[in-house]
Image: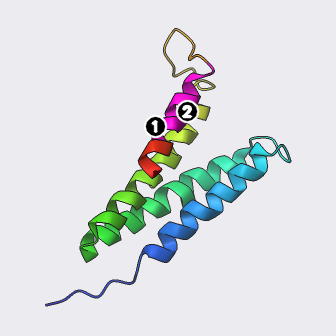
């Protein structure tokens, strides 16, 4: 029996696109990093994309499943990178500022 599942691509693509646009509005200097961006990263950029990835997996679309779940966890990990130091959950030695560039370079390589 075939299970009918809606196409998860719109959810995954909107989750990534809208969160990226909001982050870039911050990156351009219009607004400081705030709970608006963090909530979007956790809920829509992160969780919604992971759901889209799981739905893609169920549909048998390996590429979309990999892309959506990976980018969903990217957003969750980026929010964690921003929040963990403020919560006191970080290694004793502070992370060098340019290490975030390496983190983003790895994701850029994954995207390419």
Mark 2 vs mark 1: give the one in front. Answer: 1
Q: Quadrant of the N terminus?
A: bottom left
Residue 90, how many percent across, how many down?
Answer: 51, 19
**Residue beneath the point at 63% across and 57% down:** 19
Q: Which residue is mark 2?
A: 81
Local crowd at mark 1 within 10 Å, few (<14), some, or many (≥20)? few
Which secondary structure, mark 2? helix
Which secondary structure, mark 1? helix
Residue 103, how many percent across, how many down?
Answer: 50, 33
* Mark linked to residue 106: 1
**Is 69 above or below relative to 52?**
above
Earlier sequence position, callout 2 versus callout 1: 2
Residue extent of the magenta highlight? 97-107
Residue 18, how many percent across, how many down?
Answer: 64, 63
| Pick the front one: 61 or 46 | 61
The reply to whether dot 2 and dot 1 touch (C-beta < 8 Å) is no
Residue reaching furthest left?
1
| Pick the front one: 112 or 22 | 112
**Residue beneath the point at 57% across and 20% down:** 88
Question: Can residue 84 be seen by looking at this rendering?
Answer: no
**Residue beneath the point at 55% across and 57% down:** 45
Residue reaching furthest top?
93
Q: Main secondary structure of the magenta part?
A: helix
């Amino acid at each position: 029996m075939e299970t009918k599942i809606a196409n998860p691509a719109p959810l995954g693509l909107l989750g990534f696109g809208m969160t990226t646009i909001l982050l870039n509005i911050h990156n351009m200097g219009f607004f400081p990093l705030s709970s608006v961006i963090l909530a979007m990263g956790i809920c829509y950029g992160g969780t919604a994309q992971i759901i889209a990835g799981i739905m893609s997996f169920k549909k048998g679309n390996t590429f979309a499943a990999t892309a959506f779940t990976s980018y969903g966890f990217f957003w969750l990990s980026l929010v964690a990178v921003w929040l963990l130091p403020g919560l006191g959950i970080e290694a004793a030695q502070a992370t060098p500022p340019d290490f975030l560039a390496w983190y983003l370079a790895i994701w850029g390589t994954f995207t390419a």
